[in-house]
Image: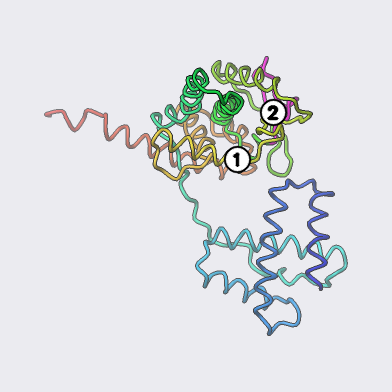
Amino acid sequence: MDLSRAVPEYLLMLKVEQNASPHTISSYRYDLELFQAWLKTESLFLEINPDTIRKYLSYMRDSGLEASTIKRRIASLRSFFNFALSEGKLEKSPIQRIARNFKTPRHTPKVLNPEEITALLQAPELLRKSLEEKLKISDNTKKIERGIGAAVRDKAMLELMFATGTRISELCGLDIDDIDIANCLIKVRGKGNKERVISFNQKKTRFYLERYYRKRCEIVSQEKAVFLNRFGKRITTRSVERNFKKFLVMVGIDKPFTPHALRHTMATCLLDNGADIRAVQEILGHTNIATTQIYTKVSTARQHAVIHKFHPRDKLTS
């Protein structure tokens, strides 16, 4: 099988027939390119067979890759070879008999504490106010006004992520018709292009969204996306990640948080406050409740810390 010709056909199928997201397609392309690059160093193989895959597995393990990374790369290969099989490019998948179960330790999600959440959500507002002060004394009004608009947008994005627990890709993928501000509802397209509707019942979230919408109306753009960059195009996940890190630095949070931490924190807060785990599963769009259950570990750890710190029993004399 000619990988160099089959891979582009496979990626096109993902886009056209499966309606996969650009992020998903990019991930599969990356995994397949790594496999192709490794094959060129393995001159022993005239064709790809189960032994090839086992040697690739050994190579990845010897390279010190985490089990979760190996699992993902093998899943990418499995999907690709299944496609090749269905297209008649192969008679048998070389990965068919390779075990699916890799032990992937579940890492405890990183969550922000209440003080960090408060500081982070305040950061865009601090930036906006600072820029508005500069605007009074500066001649470079256009640049400062763009900065103010971006701060208003970023505030709305942080608030919405924390309010709804959306993934960063889901947030960037929102279109104007996906948000019903009057009824505080958003329609999200998650993994596998599955749709779910999430309610945000916070007055502040609604207020900051409405304020951003007024700013957005000032931008000349035919783009249907909710959140725009300074060129009037849909904002990218990379831009959101970059701005998120900027706000962490601004408020002195020296921890390796990503925007996904807002999703983790929101889920943990819901469980801390007695939310039903099935409801949290539905809000987050998890197919398997086991994925949601990892947040109960964080919630239990928080409860233990609170009880240890504040329960008076050990301070009593008898």
Identify which residue, 202 or 250, lies in the foreground: 250
Indicate which label's residue lies in the foreground, 1 or 2.
Answer: 1
Note whether residue 163 is visible: no
Q: Along the horizontal axis of the image, is 36 left or right of 268? A: right
Provide the residue designation for mark 1: 239
Residue 292 is situated, as x and y percent measured from the top left of the image, at 55, 40
Q: In this view, does 282 lie above or below 4?
A: above
Q: Along the horizontal axis of the image, is 77 left or right of 19? A: left
Residue 177 is situated, as x and y percent measured from the top left of the image, at 75, 25
Note whether residue 289 is visible: yes
The three-letter code of the residue at mark 2 reads: Val
User: Which quadrant of the structure image shows residue 4?
Assistant: bottom right
Q: Along the horizontal axis of the image, is 22 left or right of 133? A: right
Residue 162 is situated, as x and y percent measured from the top left of the image, at 54, 30
Residue 226: mark in rendering: 2
Q: In this view, does 217 lie above or below 31?
A: above
Residue at 76%, 31% (x, y): give it: 223
Magenta-drawn stretch contains 176: yes
The C terminus lies in which quarter of the figure? top left
User: Which quadrant of the structure image shows residue 87?
Assistant: bottom right
Residue furthest to the front in view is: 139
Magenta-drawn stretch contains 92: no
